[in-house]
Amino acid sequence: MVGVSRKEFRDLASPEEAREAIASLNLGGGSESVPLAEARGRVLAERIDAGMDVPGFDRASMDGYAVRARDTFGADEADPAVLDLVGAVHAGVEPDVEIAEGECAEISTGAVMPSGADAVVIVERTDERDGKIEMRTAVAPGDSVMLAGADIAAGERALGPGTRITPREIGLLSALGVESVPVRAKPRVGIISTGDELVRPGQSLNSAAGQIFDVNSYTVAAGVEDAGGEAVLYPHAGDDYDEMERLLTKAATECDLVLSSGSTSASAVDVIYRVVEEQGELLLHGVAVKPGKPMLVGRLEESAYIGLPGYPVSALTIFQTFVAPAIRDAAGVQAPAAATARGKMAVRERYGEGRMRLMPVGLVEDGAGDLLVYPVDKGSGATTSLVEADGVVVVHPDTAFLDAGEEVEVDLFSPDVRPPTVFGVGEDDPALSRLLDRIERPRYLSVGSREGLRRLRNGIADVAVTTTGGEPEFDTVELGGWTREWGLVVQAGNPENVAGLADLVDRDLRFINRGTAAGLRTSFTDALATLAEERGQTRHDLVSAISGFDLTVKAHESPARKVADGRADVGLGLRATAEKLDLGFVSLGTEQVRVFANPDRVSKPGVAALETAIEDGDAVFADLPGFETA
């Protein structure tokens, strides 16, 4: 491909300049008419006046008897007025009686008032005797009657432009007989993910070739819909020049706004530059904000264009901060009620990169119910950060650090965000996952035993789950625990005839280990130390002899899945995992899983619920091979 002469942007734009650039774009608008049945959630484009009285007739608002009010004057319990019953009127039926002096008619709620009647005596204040009706109370004209136009009168303003149509407005429009509703047109937003490595969910994935599922297309599309736009997903562009140019051009002719995200390769960026500058104008490249520095803003033919970062967390953060407000404005959708919370930093967080930071954070309540805020940052490429964070804290470019205990304001991802009832950290464990299913709104981060204890000591977490031996060197309350059998996971039938640790050391077997934070890793290295002592060698000697000792994976099932895929002969794991995946297993011992709580938080309902779940967990442990109550 021929090199492209780019418009130079030597300095990163400020967040304010980015908002101004996006505000200058035309994201559509206008109006359209939709059937009443499809109007919920839309925004009215113009005023709607009532074309008729509602109700369109005088109607009874209670069951009783339609009367002339003056015929009841003076009536009471001791001296009731006695009227002749001349008929009945039911809802939905045109009256066939007329009320004269001294007469009444039985009437149902919602029925048309018969001619001559101007009030209703409720049935509870009447008696029937010998075909006549005794009225034990006097009524005034209009009592228990809804007059025509009492709800809304013909010509009256019913709803104004900009009104969001909810079930209440649907009810009013239905009462007015409105069949077609004028609403603000939704901006059409084309979404293109670039990168040869992307695969749509539901399609086959080749991890060996570095393929990953497309996260951004669906995440951003959901954000577009939430903001009031209409998301249009286009096929992946890959890094092919002609295909990317074709898709960008096609989307620009069909949509009001084109969003792209994905590949950050030089070739892909060159294509975007060329298409935007040949068919429109590039307004901005790069914003002084973390995450999300590589943002593009421009025009493509008659469409607006915004390029989002490739990493999911960065893409969503930039979308919510800069793009969603513009879509809401074009759709006429009001911004959601400010969803913010104030809390104190649970730990000290260093910064100092000289640009605004949108720091993802989580929330947790301490024992007194006060809100604590902690950073959630696994890197922009970690999709789990999307659900583990509750909002963002805007950190000013000049900020060097946020101190523990410093009060901060959190912009919540939605008004529905609530702190978890219990926040746990520590060991990855299948029994724990099942116990947490019994608790309302828990949050758990698998960070390993050592890191779990560190976070418990620092006051971030409510509980820590650990398999490391010994007692914590700080105050804790033990909630309970269980044991689990661990060892070596091998191929079904154990074709390599692995008998124990010695085979890993003495033979050329491909091994997959757990990370250094995992309790299983600690148990494994302790067992190696014992074997080394028996042989008169150092643990380092044995570690050096194991092929793959330093090849580590994160979760308790990960090594076993590598074995199942044929990418390893042996993996470190649990008996429960081996049997779940129909693999072989060589036992090396049992670990004790212990759950410790922050003493100041044992009274939290979620912590108490976890303790109860552990105490009542016999059925959980019995269902997992190799697990037992401690």
Image: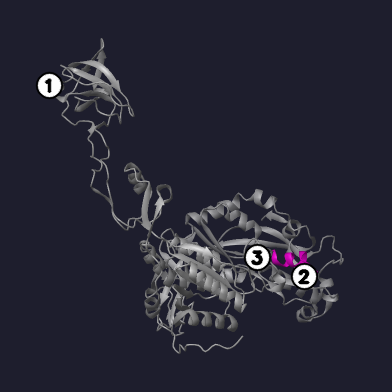
Task: Pick whichever of labels 1 and 3 is earlier in the sequence.
Answer: 1
Q: Position of residue 108 (x, y in %)?
A: 31, 26
Tell me: 72 left or right of 106. left
Q: Position of residue 214 (x, y in %)?
A: 60, 67
Which stretch appears magenta?
A: 557-569
- Foreground: disc 2 or disc 3: 2
Residue denoted by label 2: 567
Q: Nearer the viewer, residue 111 or 514?
A: 111
Q: Secondary structure at mark 1?
A: loop
Distance between the Cα atoms at labels 2 and 3? Answer: 28 Å
Residue denoted by label 3: 467
Q: In the picture, which quadrant includes the N terminus?
A: bottom right
- Foreground: disc 1 or disc 2: 1
Distance between the Cα atoms at labels 1 and 3? Answer: 87 Å
- Residue 559 colored magenta? yes
Residue denoted by label 1: 74
- Foreground: disc 1 or disc 3: 1
What number of labels is visible? Answer: 3
Distance between the Cα atoms at labels 1 and 2? Answer: 98 Å
Q: Position of residue 304 (x, y in %)?
A: 44, 73
- Residue 89 colored magenta? no
Q: Position of residue 362 (x, y in %)?
A: 48, 67
